[in-house]
Image: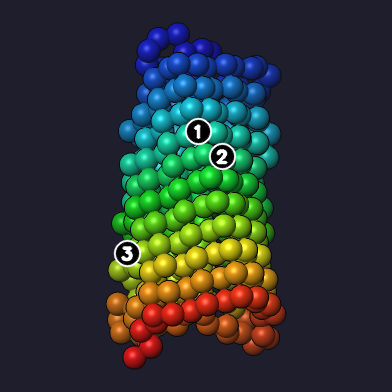
């Protein structure tokens, strides 16, 4: 099926190929693919469900897109490969994720993610690569958990460079449950949550991290909390306040894993200042 009118819902089943250009898409899944899709110069407005994505091994390529949906802006599921460049994903609900890989692979380049509960999330052995990405105004409506800039769980991985995360009610970056992060040129600003727990960067629960040239500017309770293996080069942490429930701040806290074993952290060129440790 094709987008023949100005407003359309596009969905493919296996065996077909679809190209969508210069279209405004409204409906149940703006673009959903189980077979190859090329989409460019599109506006996706969807009041009910996810935006653009692929599943069951599909290949989806998206360029120059404006996406405003309540839940998942971009998604790659069940072996799908989704490549997105020059995208703006904004005004999701407080529990929505701007970009998600759940058992699929997602490539994100030159993207703005604004107004979501989660920026990038990888789960179910999903994989995300990202470059030149900004995430702002990440907040959550579920009082039991915090928002997050980059969340990696369940044997998944995120490799990213030149990333700005500014304004998060919860965690800037979290790798846990065998999730792995490889981040270069990362800036985290204003990571402060309404919850008692908040941190700029967390590696925990069998998560692993490789970090190069990371700046954490403004967080509550923890600048960096390292409970799992991490290799760090050039880390700057400053302006760490006490948590909302009065727990003192820590610039970099290295703890132990769930089984009591030291996490195995190597760090070179680390600077910490302006920490409320009272």
Distance between the Cα atoms at labels 2 and 3? 31 Å
Per the image, the residue denoted by label 3 is 143
Distance between the Cα atoms at labels 1 and 2? 7 Å
Please report the residue visible at 50 percent of the width from the left and 46 percent of the height from the top. Answer: 133
- Compared across the picture, whether 231 is left or right of 220 comes to right
Please report the residue visible at 51 percent of the width from the left and 12 percent of the height from the top. Answer: 2
Q: In the rendered structure, are the residues bearing label 1 and label 2 in contact, judged by CB atoms less than 8 Å apart?
A: yes
Crowdedness near tag 1: few (<14), some (14–19) or many (≥20) residues, C-alpha within 10 Å: some
Taking the view exactly as shown, the residue that stands out farthest to the bottom is 278
Residue 115 tag number: none
Above-or-below relation of 208 to 163: below
Per the image, label 3 sits on a secondary structure element best described as loop
Q: Earlier in the sequence, mark 1 or mark 2?
A: 1
Q: Earlier in the sequence, mark 3 or mark 1?
A: 1
**Residue 219 occupies quadrant:** bottom left
Per the image, the residue denoted by label 1 is 86
Examine the rendering and report whether any part of residue 181 can be seen: no
> Residue 182, how many percent across, how many down?
65, 59
Please report the residue visible at 68 percent of the width from the left and 40 percent of the height from the top. Answer: 79
Per the image, the residue denoted by label 2 is 109
**Residue 245 occupies quadrant:** bottom left
**Residue 59 occupies quadrant:** top right
Q: Earlier in the sequence, mark 2 or mark 3?
A: 2
Above-or-below relation of 269 to 31: below
Q: Nearer the viewer, residue 219 or 175?
A: 219
Distance between the Cα atoms at labels 3 and 1? 33 Å
> Residue 272, how many percent across, how many down?
48, 79
| Quadrant of the frame with the C terminus | bottom left
> Residue 5, how many percent across, how many down?
40, 9
Nearer the viewer's eye, disc 3 or disc 1?
1
């Amino acid at each position: 099926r094709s987008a023949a009118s100005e407003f359309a819902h596009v969905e493919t089943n296996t065996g077909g190929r679809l190209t969508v250009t210069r279209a405004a898409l409204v409906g149940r899944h703006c673009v959903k693919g189980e077979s190859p899709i090329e989409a460019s110069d599109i506006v996706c407005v969807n009041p009910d469900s996810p935006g653009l994505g692929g599943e069951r091994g599909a290949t989806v390529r998206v360029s120059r897109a404006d996406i405003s949906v309540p839940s998942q802006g971009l998604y790659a599921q069940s072996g799908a490969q989704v490549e997105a460049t020059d995208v703006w994903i904004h005004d999701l609900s407080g529990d929505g994720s701007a970009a998600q890989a759940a058992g699929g692979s997602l490539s994100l380049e030159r993207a703005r993610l604004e107004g979501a509960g989660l920026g990038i999330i990888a789960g179910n052995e999903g994989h995300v690569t990202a470059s030149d990405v900004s995430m702002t105004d990440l907040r959550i409506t579920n009082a039991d958990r915090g928002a997050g800039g980059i969340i990696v769980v369940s044997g998944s991985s995120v490799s990213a460079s030149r990333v700005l995360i500014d304004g998060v009610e919860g965690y800037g970056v979290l790798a846990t449950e065998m999730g792995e992060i490889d981040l270069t040129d990362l800036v985290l600003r204003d990571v402060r949550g309404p919850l008692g727990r908040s941190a700029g960067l967390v590696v925990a629960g069998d998560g692993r991290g490789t970090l190069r040239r990371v700046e954490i500017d403004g967080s509550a309770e923890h600048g960096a909390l390292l409970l799992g293996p991490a290799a760090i080069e050039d880390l700057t942490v400053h302006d760490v306040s006490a948590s909302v429930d009065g727990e003192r701040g820590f610039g970099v806290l290295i703890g132990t894993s769930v089984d009591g074993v030291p996490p195995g952290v190597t760090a070179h060129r680390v600077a910490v200042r302006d920490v409320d440790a009272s």
